[in-house]
Image: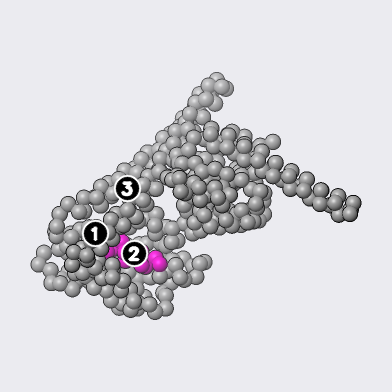
Amino acid sequence: MEHDNRHMDMDGITFFGAVSAAVTHDMKNFLAIINENAGLLGDLAVNAQNRSLPIDPRKALGISEKIRNQVARADTMIKQFNRFSHSMDHAEETVDVEEMVHLVAGLAARIIRHHGVFLTVTPATVPCRLKVHRFGLLHLIFRAVEIACKILDNGAMDTQKQVLVSFGMDPKVPEICFTLDPVPTGGWDTLFDQPKDLDMRDRVHMAVKTNNTGNGFCLYRIRPDHA
Amino acid sequence: MSEKVLLVDDEKEFLDIMSERMEARGMTVKTADSADQALAMLEKESFDAIVMDFKMPGMDGIQALKNIKSQKPELQIILLTGYATVEKTVEAMKIGATDLLEKPADLESLAAKIKQAKADKMLLVEKKTEEKIKDILQRFSG
């Protein structure tokens, strides 16, 4: 049992590392764009000085707008990363699953993009809440997204790859579904069958099944929730 | 003569602003948003140097570097990366990268490296031409 816990802890650290790497890489890109915009402002000032002409106010405004946009992107990313970092603060608590999916989609945006996949989250029609360890749920959702992307990696290169995330209609049976396009042939039975995946699912008391239309999979709660 | 550069990055805004600043410094800049697009452009056009992001969707930096080097061995490739570790730098250099710069990079030092890259490329081309001439002369004299 102690061994299993260590196994799960190592997986958790690996997950934290993967998210941190992706986020810090994105942050560097935001900084690079801000840096170039600041440099462009400097270029404008030098040019204006050399030619004894005023700086074009429209050009300067455009640059300042671009800097603000990048600062907003970086701010969103830092907020998401901060929420992610605090996901380990508490034991089980009632969490909004849809919010967790959005958090993973934001944090893993770079990883998803690298697979050439577009991920869309359909808003839940009924509240989708679970009493669960927040970090464990984020880890499982991240793993589900990773699995979906890897399945789509095997498809044709020139087709648009999409993952649609939706939620169950029954608030008593929380469910997160991943619909894949293009539809791969088979392979659903072996999803989440690695020991680390089983540990991950057990930790949040969730199981996996093929979705109703056969073009994806759903994660659902196997333990009655008293949240 | 100005340096002709192919700038490759998946961030469109970065491509736009970098190319504007590089062109203001007298360089001729073309852009590509993926390694695949860069490889397709290399088949049609020649460049003095490539400035390429190391991590992009699709083909990864190491694979892109290998493919470009096998297609155009004399081409100088300067890599841009979020985090330049010693291991990553050594690996990239072994495959044939000219240099590896960390983002955000200083444009003046990048411009200097591009100038140097063009000079290095010209030397390589000259050397190749000399070898060809030597080879032809040897064949005729033999």
Q: Which residue position is annotated with label 1?
A: A9
Chain holding disc 2: A
Chain holding disc 3: A
Is-magenta flag for residue A33? no
Figure check: B71 above or below A31: below
Determine whether, in the image, residue A90 is placed left or right of residue A85. left
Determine whether, in the image, residue A221 is placed left or right of residue A104. left
Tell me which amino acid carries mark 2.
Answer: Val
Quick one: SS at disc 1?
helix
Q: Which residue position is annotated with label 3?
A: A77
Q: Where residue A80 sits: x, y (%)? A: 28, 50
Q: Residue at x 40, y 70 (%)?
A: A151
Quick one: SS at disc 3?
helix
Q: Which mark is residue A145?
A: 2
Q: Start and end of the magenta stretch? A: A138-150
Distance, label 2 to label 3, CA atoms, is: 19 Å
Name the N-terminal-most of marks 1 and 2: 1
Q: Residue at x 63, y 56 (%)?
A: B70
Distance, label 3 to label 1, CA atoms, is: 25 Å
Q: Residue at x 49, y 41 (%)?
A: B101
Q: Where residue B55 sits: x, y (%)? A: 46, 52
Q: Is residue A182 visible?
A: yes
Camera-nearest residue between B63 and A204? B63
